[in-house]
Image (cartoon, helix red, strand yellow):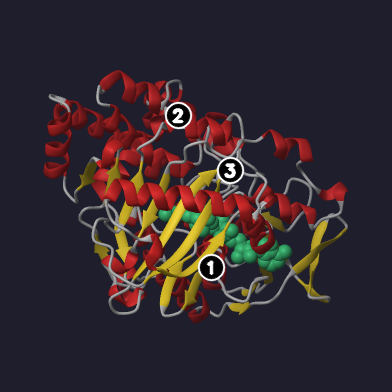
Amino acid sequence: MKKKITIIGSGFSSLAAAAYLAKAGHEVHIFEKNDTIGGRARQHKAKGFTFDMGPSWYWMPDVFERFFADFNKKPSDYYQLERLNPGYQVIFENGKKIQIGDNFEEIYEVFEAEEKGASIKLQKFIKEAQDNYKVAIEKLVYKPGLSPLELVTPETIKKLNTFFSTVSKDVDKEFESENLKQILKFPVLFLGAKPSETPSFYNFMNYADFGLGTWHPKGGFFAVVQAMQNLAESLGVKIHTNSDVQKINIEDKKAKSIKVNDEIIESDIILSGADYHHSEQLLDEKYRQYSESYWDKKVFAPSSLLFYLGFDKKIKNAEHHNLFFDVDFDAHADSIYSTKKWPKEPLFYANFTSKTDSDTAPEGCENGFFLVPIAPGLEDTNELREKYYGIIMDRFEKLTGEKIKDHVIYKKSYCVNDFVKDYNSYKGNAYGMANTLLQTAFLRPKLKSKKIDGLFFTGQLTVPGPGVPPALISGKLVSQLILKSLQS
Ligand SMILES: Cc1cc2nc3c(=O)[nH]c(=O)nc-3n(C[C@H](O)[C@H](O)[C@H](O)COP(=O)(O)OP(=O)(O)OC[C@H]3O[C@@H](n4cnc5c(N)ncnc54)[C@H](O)[C@@H]3O)c2cc1C
């Protein structure tokens, strides 16, 4: 029977869930508090520049293909993808650069040039990572996290040992070059935790990096949001923007309605894709599953200080994606996860999508996105933002030998307070909850409320975790649970 399903938020996980639920024949409404959709993957346009506000690394293209295939579609039905070469470059001390190409031969050469014998070690490392990737995709990440038993298969049992070592330990054991070690530890940062806290199994991210590549959707990541919107709307989903959900109402331990801009919307099923902590705040306290101290003890993925910059010239000495790893990696990681302070010497990331996608900046100009990962919950003031702006612009100029500061014609900053204000993000986190050993699979916050019938959750704080591909998977998993609950 056709049910009315209301979804809070329009991030990737909500859009994905909406599409599956509408395909199954239900009446689906998305309520988004902001005036545009996409959540952390919104787009910002100003003075002829186009910026993706959040994600810029399109990794694991197979997950996007699987998602669209569920609707007999392909990503290319909606957007054009280009594999970047170099995928990215890393800038080390004194401006030394290492570029990661779009094929293994080039990557092996780069490793060998950096450390004799490293290409052979890398081949072994990647073989293992590829195997882990296969197990992760086929046996683990598409599981709803209901019980530990769902993870027990002959393939996963063989991998048990990889949960008792860490990515850092494995990389440090095999490789000598500090630069190569940093390149190999970088991909797991997407999972939101320190490489020294991330189980070795997650080295499948290295296969995602070198084997599956770094892609760019033409027009930017927002093209993927638009694709999801087109798909969802074609299936009948109704999207309501400027619709702030203020309350989830419960009757007889059953989800009953939501209050949106002072209007009550009756619902058979309520699904929240907003940050889990906030979603539970919309409930009376007795209906919440997790206490404040539960959330406080969790390892959250970083927040970020971001700058969206428009330049009046083309930037010559940078690539599409640039990682500035010229300072102590561990010291910065400690500032995020241990001391929880602003970093003394920040690592940072800069992208210029207009280098490979000219439509995202006016002719002769470049758009820039600079990101410094920081601990969630830090004090956020204009003075601090400006201090770090100065630091990273100076470092960029020094390391690349190119003047950019005097060429900025558009500037917008974004940090902890904005994440809280715009997304109701817990402590202003950018990427949700980290994938540490104790925050993996069935140990993450649940997709289905344990206390209320008809109430579900999705998104980067649930399974499988942070990032756009996991958000798509989370939307699929929760939709399956909802459909199952409607059958019983
Ligand atoms: C700066 C940054 C860079 C990133 N880089 C990458 C990357 O390169 N590659 C990658 O794969 N991932 C990246 N990520 C992570 C990725 O963007 C997220 O994991 C993913 O987009 C999260 O989707 P979601 O559906 O969980 O939630 P969100 O996108 O957070 O969506 C939640 C939505 O709920 C809405 N909402 C909240 N409260 C309410 C309410 N009361 N009423 C109505 N609506 C509400 C919010 O406005 C928001 O739109 C990045 C994230 C950030 C912030």
Residue 225: % across, % down: 46, 70
Which amino acid, by three-letter code, is at mark 3? Met
Which amino acid, by three-letter code, is at mark 2? Asp
Name the residue tied to disc 3.
Answer: 433
Q: CA distance from mark 3 to mark 1?
A: 19 Å
> In terms of secondary structure, where does tag 1 sit?
loop
Residue 209: % across, % down: 30, 45
- First of labels 2, 3 by sequence position: 2
Residue at 48% x, 29% y is 331
- First of labels 3, 1 by sequence position: 1
Residue 346: % across, % down: 47, 41
Give residue 455's quadrant in the image: bottom right
Residue at 29% x, 71% y is 357
Name the residue tied to disc 1.
Answer: 38
Give residue 351's quadrant in the image: bottom left
Q: Is residue 69 above or below residue 226?
A: above
Q: Residues within 10 Å of mark 3 (few under 14, many from 20)?
A: many
Q: CA distance from mark 2 to mark 3?
A: 20 Å
Q: Is residue 429 above or below residue 233?
A: above
Q: Residues within 10 Å of mark 1 (few under 14, many from 20)?
A: many
Q: Identify which residue, 417 or 427, lies in the foreground.
A: 417
Q: Quadrant of the N terminus?
A: bottom right
Q: CA distance from mark 2 to mark 1?
A: 33 Å
Residue at 30% x, 38% y is 92
Frontmost of labels 2 and 3 is: 2
Instruction: Report whether 446 appears left or right of 450.
Output: left
